[in-house]
Image (cartoon, coloured by chain):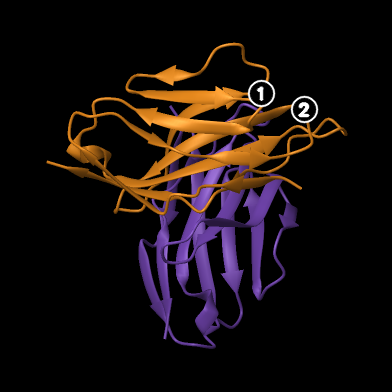
Chain colours: A orange, B purple
Amino acid sequence: AQKITQTQPGMFVQEKEAVTLDCTYDTSDPSYGLFWYKQPSSGEMIFLIYQGSYDQQNATEGRYSLNFQKARKSANLVISASQLGDSAMYFCAMRVWDSSGSARQLTFGSGTQLTVLP
Amino acid sequence: SQTIHQWPATLVQPVGSPLSLECTVEGTSNPNLYWYRQAAGRGLQLLFYSVGIGQISSEVPQNLSASRPQDRQFILSSKKLLLSDSGFYLCAWSLGGLRSPLHFGNGTRLTVT
């Protein structure tokens, strides 16, 4: 069974600085995808970035980048130049492509609450 | 472009009352549809998902049920709510495949009193 672990319940970062949110995962399937979502206090879940297990390059989307270390089974989210609007809960999630050829459902971590300080 | 609508935004219901939450998707055909629940300050728990009309898979046994009467409509129901059903309910859709992200509605905050 797959598992996602986010060990940082809360993080603080100064505005304009970079911050790394940790995510480790566990799966025995070789084919999987990792997702990061942002959940502001309003509650909506916003998709940020995706990394596939066979992708050669680390994913980047604007100020978001994913530090993917396959051997360590980690997929940390890096937010550069933090803004006040980045204050939110951040969730890491994983989907595996199992041996029967189907994609299983997304499994979410417990989340990290990021607070950006002015 | 695709949009997802979920309503109501908030709901306060007494214990033992029925529940019906509705979700519709526009701008795509045959999406995968999902219902998640999020307890306060916690992660997301998958309740139900559907890959087609009338096809519902349940992930967690409970007093909730789901139905997909039309291609882009997903309904979460209960005949009798429990206090433990309180939480934030999120509907989501995705295309099939490994790389497809889930796209979420704005959620329904349910309080069972």
Residue named by callout 2: A30
Task: List the single residue furthest toward the top.
Answer: A56
Q: Residues within 10 Å of mark 2 (few under 14, many from 20)?
A: few
Tell me: A33 left or right of A81: right
Task: List the single residue furthest toward the left.
Answer: A118
Nearer to us in this view, A30 or B96: A30
- Dot 2 falls on a residue whose secondary structure is loop
Which residue is drawn at the image coordinates 53% and 46% (left, top)? B92
As shown in the figure, which amino acid type bears the numbered disc 2?
Pro
Q: Is residue B19 above or below residue B35?
A: below
- Dot 1 falls on a residue whose secondary structure is loop
Question: Can residue A37 be seen here?
Answer: yes
Q: Position of residue A117 (x, y in %)?
A: 17, 43
Q: Position of residue B108 (x, y in %)?
A: 41, 61
Q: Is residue B78 above or below residue B47?
A: below
As shown in the figure, which amino acid type bears the numbered disc 1?
Ser
Which residue is drawn at the image coordinates 78% and 33% (left, top)? A29
Which residue is drawn at the image coordinates 54% and 88% (left, top)? B16
Q: Which mark is residue B68?
A: none
Which residue is drawn at the image coordinates 64% and 33% (left, top)? A73
Tell me: A104 left or right of B85: right
Residue named by callout 1: A53
Q: Quadrant of the C terminus of chain A?
A: top left
Q: Position of residue A4 (x, y in %)?
A: 60, 46
User: Going from the N terminus, do you reach mark 2 or mark 1 first?
Assistant: 2
State yes or no: discs 2 and 1 in contact (Cβ < 8 Å): yes
Q: Position of residue B5 (x, y in %)?
A: 43, 48
Chain of the residue displaying label 2: A
Q: CA distance from mark 2 to mark 1?
A: 7 Å
